[in-house]
Amino acid sequence: MNRSYRQATQTLPIGMARRYASYRPAPADQLPGVPITDVGGYDELIAAVEHIGMNIEVSRAGLAAFDAAIPALAEGLEEAVAMYFGDVVIHSIPGSQWRVIREGEPLVEMPGGNMADVMAVARSRFTDGRHTLVDVLDHLDKMADHSGT
């Protein structure tokens, strides 16, 4: 498996259940308040895309390639897709961070306070497919307040 994109494991936001994220304690030298940028939780998705000859890259370009492969994937990967999509948002929109308002429902907060329900985005992509994940990422980027960056 190509996991060169993985960052050092970080602490999870309060309320993010382990079933939605890979979790190991953060390193002792991690600074408090450092935004969470890679929660993982999509090993099953990595295996599924490797099965069809792809690798996952946590970037806009990787998301576009992944989006095109969604029809070839089995159902039941919505949660894993949501976590992957959230990681791409965090890496693509500076100042974005994971937030959990209710346990088991992770959100991504963009600069300026707008939030994206990554689970709803993933479910929508699988059920109606009108908007690609890249479309949603671009929309979130337009909504983000970039004045501080």
Image (cartoon, rainbow, N blue to C red):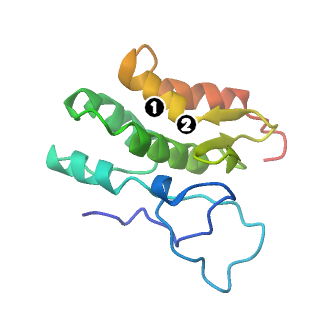
Give coordinates of residue 134: x percent, y percent: 47, 29
Give coordinates of residue 18: x percent, y percent: 51, 60
Query: Residue at coordinates 64% horizontally, 33% vertically from top-left?
Result: 116
**Circle 2: residue type:** Val
Query: Residue at coordinates 27% horizontally, 32% vertically from top-left?
Result: 75
* Dot 2 alpha-carbon crowd within 10 angstroms: few under 14, some 14 to 19, many 20 or more: many
- Please, is residue 100 above or below residue 4 in the view? above
Q: How far apart are marks 1 and 2 (CA)?
A: 6 Å
Front-most of residues 57 and 40 = 40
Give coordinates of residue 83: x percent, y percent: 48, 47
Q: Name the residue under label 2.
A: 118
Query: Residue at coordinates 68% horizontally, 47% vertically from top-left?
Result: 100
- Please, is residue 146 above or below residue 44 in the view? above
Which image quadrant is residue 15 in?
bottom right
Q: Is residue 82 left or right of residue 45?
A: right
Give coordinates of residue 103: x percent, y percent: 64, 48
Q: Residue 122 carries which label?
A: 1
- Please, is residue 24 above or below residue 102 in the view? below
Q: Is residue 112 left or right of residue 104?
A: right
Q: In this view, does 75 lie to the left or right of 80?
A: left
**Circle 1: residue type:** Ala
